[in-house]
Image (spheres, grey):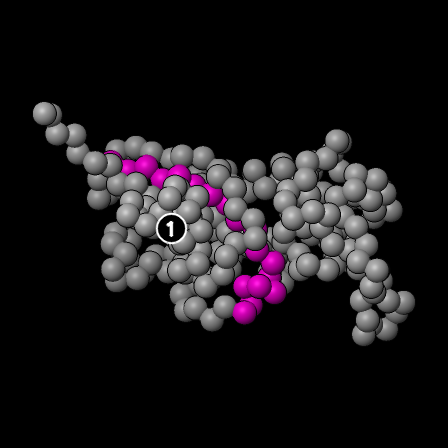
Amino acid sequence: MKHYPDPLALVDVALFTIREGRLALLLATRRNRDEPYCGALALPGGVIHVDEDEDAQDAARRVVRTKLGIDPPYLEQLYTFSGRLRDPRRWSLSVAYYSLVPQQVLEATHIEGLEFVPVDALPKLPFDHDAIAAMAIRRLRGKSTYSSLLTFLLPQAFTLPELHAVYEQVTGSNTNIAAFRKKVLDEGMIEPTGQRRTGGQHRAPDLYRRKGAGLQELKRTI
């Protein structure tokens, strides 16, 4: 029987959050055991464990748990990157995912070697992680205009101005907040919690939450 060499099978995750009011991507420092490109900043990723991972998404969730100590609230497959030259070790393929995590959740992690870099100031990344990051940013920006995707960047309870600010930051658009409010409420992507944000100097704003646990696609763009 002819022997066929096995390719290197990996997963990589483009994990987004809002950091200091800007859309940021999580990068991890590759350590001594992470040859090649030891010491470089890269997307979190790892080899698929065939004896442990049920599928590629299970592998991606394991990578996030291992590197961050959290279970990502939103994780979606992006694309499969493959080829002879993408990894100096051997022919490889990577099933890439993108994930959204609220800043408050990430602040609870205390793992060394992680950096949150604004997406408009990313350094040169190893392998083909530049291409993965660029595709993930395009997907995030595009899908944010016709779904409840951006609510996964916010805590469980948030105000409409907070959602509006995240929308403008991610999409790069300037939208009238009154029109934005009407669209998101008419589409039913969020619902009031019945509570208000307290502690400010002005009238306490109403708090909202994502309607339903999963992603909701809208009938029209925001």
Q: Residue furthest top?
A: 1
Q: Quadrant of residue 148?
A: top right
In the rendering, at what x and y percent does residue 122 appear? Answer: 48, 51
Image quarter hosting the C terminus: top right
Residue 24, relative to residue 181: is it above or below? Answer: below
In the rendering, at what x and y percent does residue 10 appear? Answer: 33, 44
Q: Quadrant of residue 159?
A: bottom right
62 or 84: nearer the eye?
Answer: 62
- Type of amino acid under label 1: Gly
Q: Residue at x 38, y 50 (%)?
A: 45
Q: Which residue is mark 1?
A: 45
Q: Is residue 34 left or right of residue 209?
A: left
Neighbourhood count class around disc 1 (C-alpha, 10 Å): few under 14, some 14–19, many 20 upward: many
Residue 161 seen in this snapshot: no
Q: Residue at x 75, y 31 (%)?
A: 219
Q: Residue at x 56, y 38 (%)?
A: 139
196 or 137: nearer the eye?
Answer: 196
SS category of the residue bearing label 1: strand
Q: Residue furthest left?
A: 1
The part of the chain drawn in magenta is 91-108
In the rendering, at what x and y percent does residue 113 appear? Answer: 40, 65
In the rendering, at what x and y percent does residue 23 appear? Answer: 60, 53
Q: Is residue 143 left or right of residue 162?
A: left
